[in-house]
C-alpha cells in the first residue's frame, strides 16, 4: 500500500527591511534592467515570492500557499533599531574605538538630557561648572587650631605635582580573578599587597619583579579591604565577603580569624553577612569593620576578639562599603554605603542615629576619605558620576564645596571606582581615579587613569599605556615614593615618572612577568568571561597562550595624551 502523504501548508512570511542598508538592493541595480525583468517573470510563474516596494521599505511575502484563507501572515522586521531605546532611525554602541550613545537618553557622563556623551561639556573640560576653592584664607579659629597645632607641617605654598606616567614593571595574570584592592607596605617601599575576587592575597616585590607569592587559604571569596597592623608591619588584617576578618602573617601565610559573622556556614542569602569597609583606630587599638546589613563591628587588636555588639550605622539591610578614621583625630570615623549617604561619627559615643553629619549623595557612595595631612577635607566617589569635595569639616556640611563630573559609573563585572588622595601631596588637592568611558587613541579604545586637582576640578594628567586596553578601577599611590600601583583585570602594573624610570626596551623582558599558565589550561567557564577574557589584551596577538616564551613588551606612545 502506497504511503499517504499530507500536503504541507506554510503560513505567509512578510519580511520588512530598509532597502538602503541591504547589499542585495545595490547588487540588483548593478545587474541591469534585463536581468531584473527575467527575475520578475520567474516570480510570476512560481507564485511563491511576491515583492512589493513602498518608499524606502521592501516587503517580501514567502509561502507555498499565499492565497489560502485563514492563515495570518508572520512579519519579520529588519529595520535599523537602536539597542538602547528600541526606536528606529539611529544606532548606539561602539563604532571602532568610539562609543556613540543613544540621543534619546540623557548623557551617560553627566546624566543630563539635551546632549550626548561625545558633546558633553564635562568631557571636554573636567573643571566645567566647578567653583574653584577660594585663595583667600577663610578658615575659622577652630580649624587653625586643628591644623597648625596638631599638624604644623602643612605648607602654605602648593608644590608641583609629580605624575607617575610610565609603566615600569608588571605582572600579567597574577591573580586567578580580578584585582579588588591594593595596599603598600608601611616600611618596605618595594612591597605591594593585592587582593582578588577569589579571596587570594598576593605579596609582590616589584623591585625584584620575579619575587611574588599568592596565598589562597586566607579567604574563600572576595577580599575587599586590607590594613597593616600598626604594631607589627609583618601582620595584616583583611576583610572579605565570606564574613570574616583574618589576621595573617605576610611572610608565611599563616592566619587566624578574629571575627566570623557566619559561624554556622551558609544559611541562605538573607542571613549571610559580608564585610566590606575596614579601618584601624591605632589610638584605641580597634579594628573597625562594616557588613552588608549596615552594622559596624569592632575587634580589639590586643586580644583579637570582638569587643561589643554590632552597631547600626546605616540603613538596615544596606551595604556599608567604606570606613576611614581621621588621620589627625582618629575618634572621627567616616562611613559610606549603598543608602546614598556618607556619615561622620564620633567613636567615643557611637550609637544608632547619632552621626555628627550626614552627607547626602545622588547615588551609591563607593568611597569616602578624609584628607591625609590635616584631616579637614573629605573626598567621596559616587555612582552618579560625581566626585564631591568638602573643604572643611568645620564649615557648612549641608552641601559639598565642589562637585566634579567624572566617569566612574561601572557595570557589575568591575571593581568599584574609588578616588583617593595623594598621601604625599601636602596641599591635599591631588586625587587619582580610573576612568570608565574609553577614549580613542590612535584607533584603540583606552581607559586612562586620571589625576585630578580637587581644588579646581582640572584634569592634571591622564596616564595610559597602549598595551593596557582593559579598565583600571583599582589604583593606589605610594605613601613615600612617586609610584602608582594599578590593578587591571587580573594583572598588576607599577607606574613611575618618565624622568626617573628607565625606558623599557624591546629586548628587556625581565620587568614583565606573565603568570596564569595553569588557569589557561583549565579552560573558561561562561560565568567567568568577565575576569578571564580581558587579560588576553595584554598578550601579543601573534603568540598563543601555550607558547614557551612570550615577548610581551612595553611601548611608549609619542602622542601628547599618551
Image (cartoon, grey):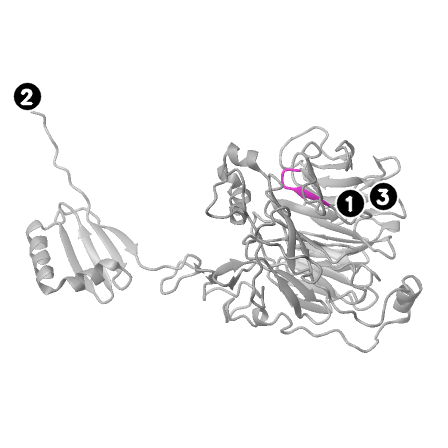
Residue for badge 3: 286
Q: Earlier in the sequence, mark 2 or mark 3?
A: 2
Q: Residues within 10 Å of mark 2 (few under 14, many from 20)?
A: few
Q: Between 116 and 491, which is closer to the camera in this rendering?
A: 491
User: Disc 2 to disc 3, how far (Cα)?
Assistant: 92 Å
Task: Provide residue 335's location: percent of width, then percent of height.
Answer: 75, 53
Q: Is residue 19 visible?
A: yes
Q: Residues within 10 Å of mark 1 (few under 14, many from 20)?
A: many
226 or 186: nearer the viewer: 186
Check disc 3 and report its element: helix, strand or loop.
Answer: strand
Residue positioned 83% across, 55% down in the render = 326
Residue 514: quadrant of the picture: top right
Question: Residue 239: x percent and y percent?
Answer: 73, 41
Specify the principal SS of the magenta part: strand
Residue underneath mark 2: 1
Q: What stretch of residues is rendered in magenta?
A: 192-199
Q: Quadrant of the C terminus?
A: bottom right
Q: Nearer the viewer, residue 274 or 369?
A: 369
Amino acid at each position: 500500500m502506497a504511503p499517504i502523504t499530507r500536503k504541507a501548508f506554510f503560513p505567509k512570511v512578510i519580511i520588512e527591511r530598509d532597502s538602503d542598508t541591504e547589499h542585495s538592493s545595490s547588487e540588483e541595480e548593478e545587474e541591469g534592467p534585463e536581468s531584473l525583468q527575467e527575475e520578475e517573470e520567474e516570480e510570476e510563474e512560481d507564485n511563491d515570492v511576491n515583492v512589493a516596494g513602498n518608499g524606502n521599505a521592501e516587503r517580501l511575502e514567502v509561502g507555498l500557499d499565499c492565497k489560502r484563507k485563514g492563515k495570518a501572515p508572520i512579519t519579520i522586521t529588519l529595520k535599523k533599531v537602536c539597542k538602547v531605546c528600541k526606536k528606529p532611525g539611529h544606532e548606539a554602541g561602539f563604532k571602532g574605538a568610539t562609543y556613540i550613545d543613544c540621543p534619546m537618553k540623557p548623557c551617560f557622563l553627566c546624566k543630563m538630557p539635551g546632549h550626548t556623551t561625545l558633546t558633553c561639556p564635562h568631557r571636554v573640560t573636567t573643571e566645567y561648572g566647578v567653583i574653584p576653592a577660594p585663595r583667600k584664607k577663610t578658615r575659622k579659629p577652630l580649624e587653625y587650631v586643628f591644623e597648625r597645632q596638631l599638624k604644623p607641617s602643612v605648607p602654605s605654598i602648593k608644590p608641583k605635582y609629580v605624575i607617575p606616567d610610565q609603566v615600569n614593571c608588571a605582572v600579567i595574570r597574577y591573580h586567578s580573578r580580578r584585582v579588588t584592592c591594593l595596599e603598600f607596605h608601611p616600611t618596605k617601599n618595594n612591597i605591594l599587597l593585592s587582593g582578588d575576587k577569589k579571596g587570594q592575597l598576593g605579596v609582590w616585590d616589584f623591585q625584584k619583579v620575579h619575587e611574588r607569592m599568592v596565598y589562597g587559604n586566607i579567604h574563600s571569596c572576595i577580599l575587599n579591604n586590607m590594613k597593616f597592623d600598626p604594631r607589627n608591619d609583618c601582620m595584616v588584617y583583611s576583610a572579605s565577603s565570606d564574613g570574616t576578618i583574618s589576621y595573617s602573617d605576610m611572610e608565611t601565610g599563616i592566619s587566624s580569624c578574629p571575627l566570623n559573622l557566619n559561624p554556622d556556614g551558609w544559611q541562605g542569602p538573607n542571613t549571610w553577612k559580608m564585610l566590606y569597609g575596614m579601618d584601624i583606630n591605632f589610638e584605641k587599638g580597634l579594628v573597625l569593620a562594616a557588613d552588608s546589613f549596615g552594622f559596624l563591628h569592632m575587634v580589639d587588636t590586643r586580644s583579637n576578639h570582638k569587643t561589643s555588639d554590632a552597631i547600626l550605622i546605616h540603613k538596615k539591610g544596606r551595604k556599608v562599603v567604606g570606613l576611614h578614621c581621621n588621620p589627625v583625630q582618629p575618634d572621627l570615623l567616616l562611613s559610606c554605603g549603598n543608602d546614598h549617604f556618607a556619615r561622620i561619627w564620633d567613636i567615643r559615643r557611637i550609637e544608632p542615629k547619632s552621626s555628627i553629619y550626614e552627607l547626602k549623595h545622588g547615588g551609591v557612595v563607593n568611597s569616602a576619605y578624609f584628607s591625609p595631612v590635616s584631616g579637614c577635607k573629605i573626598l567621596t566617589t559616587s555612582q552618579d558620576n560625581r566626585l564631591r569635595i568638602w573643604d572643611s569639616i568645620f564649615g557648612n556640611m549641608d552641601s559639598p564645596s565642589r562637585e566634579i563630573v567624572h566617569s566612574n559609573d561601572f557595570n557589575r563585572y568591575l571593581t568599584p571606582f574609588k578616588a583617593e588622595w595623594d598621601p604625599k601631596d601636602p596641599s591635599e588637592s591631588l586625587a587619582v581615579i580610573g576612568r570608565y568611558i574609553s577614549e580613542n587613541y590612535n584607533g584603540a579604545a583606552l581607559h586612562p587613569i586620571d589625576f585630578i586637582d580637587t581644588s579646581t576640578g582640572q584634569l592634571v594628567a591622564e596616564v595610559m599605556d597602549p598595551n593596557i586596553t582593559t579598565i583600571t578601577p583599582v589604583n593606589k599611590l605610594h605613601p613615600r615614593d612617586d609610584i602608582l600601583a594599578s590593578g587591571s583585570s587580573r594583572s598588576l602594573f607599577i607606574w613611575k615618572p618618565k624622568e626617573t624610570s628607565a625606558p623599557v626596551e624591546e629586548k628587556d623582558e625581565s620587568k614583565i612577568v606573565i603568570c596564569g599558565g595553569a588557569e589557561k589550561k583549565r579552560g573558561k567557564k561562561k560565568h567567568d568571561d568577565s575576569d578571564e577574557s580581558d587579560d588576553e589584551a595584554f598578550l601579543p596577538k601573534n603568540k598563543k597562550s601555550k607558547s614557551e616564551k612570550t615577548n610581551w613588551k612595553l611601548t611608549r606612545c609619542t602622542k601628547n595624551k599618551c
